[in-house]
Image: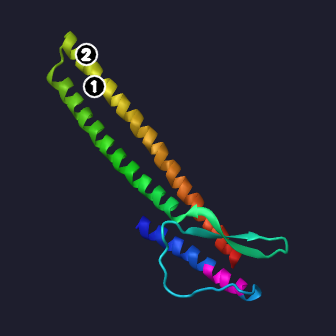
Amino acid sequence: MRKVRMQSWMIAAGMVGLLGAAIIAPAQAGVAVKWGEFEASRGDALTGASADGDDRYVLRPSSIKVRDIEALQEAQKVGLSELQSLKSKVEGQDRAFEEFKRKDGSSTSSNDSQVASLKRALEEQKTTIDRQKGEIEGLKRSLDDLKRNVDTLSSKVK
């Protein structure tokens, strides 16, 4: 669902850029706009509008490439996958730890070291999960910022 939504706004932004170029094209001699079906390649830059000195908007390619957005999406998928994997490991270790506590209530030195080792591993994995959650949130914010920028640019073109 998210991929479809992300592709649709990228297509919408491209179409807005093409429409804006079609409006500006008659005013600029030698500028051609090709209408029809197209597919963006990874190296294509998103189109953005900027104001020139005469209070007109000029369409220009931005520094954001299709591959940048695809890389953000892929990084988010990988981060979510790693997070899920670590979460299941932590849950498994938590169950093992609880079972261990139920089975053996004695406090021998070998059991104490095993408990301490399990606690350390559990804390390390919780820390890793928290770090990755922060990274995923950062990726989500970046994608939201990109979407807002495209929406802003498309509204300026209209």
Secondary structure, mark 2, is helix
In which quadrant of the rendered image does the N terminus lie?
bottom left
Pinpoint residue 59: horizontal percent, then vertical percent.
69, 74
Kindly indicate the quadrant of the structure image that contains residue 133: top left
Q: Amino acid at mark 1?
A: Leu
Residue shown at the point (49%, 43%) measured from the top left: 134
In contact (CB < 8 Å): disc 2 and disc 1: no
Quickly name the residue at label 2. 113
Q: The magenta stretch spans which residues?
A: 18-25
Whether residue 44 is visible, yes or no, is: yes
10 Å crowding of disc 2: few (<14), some (14-19), many (20+)? few
In the displayed structure, 7 sits above or below 21; it is: above
Say whether disc 2 or disc 1 marks the residue closer to the N-terminus: 2
Q: Amino acid at mark 2?
A: Ser
> Left or right: where does residue 39 sit relative to residue 145?
left
Residue shown at the point (24%, 37%) measured from the top left: 92
Residue shown at the point (52%, 59%) measured from the top left: 68
In which quadrant of the rendered image does the C terminus lie?
bottom right
Pinpoint residue 67: horizontal percent, then vertical percent.
49, 62
Of residue 74 and residue 117, the one placed in the foreground of this image is 74
> Left or right: where does residue 122 sit relative to residue 35?
left
Reply yes or no: does residue 106 show up in magenta.
no
Quickly name the residue at label 1. 118
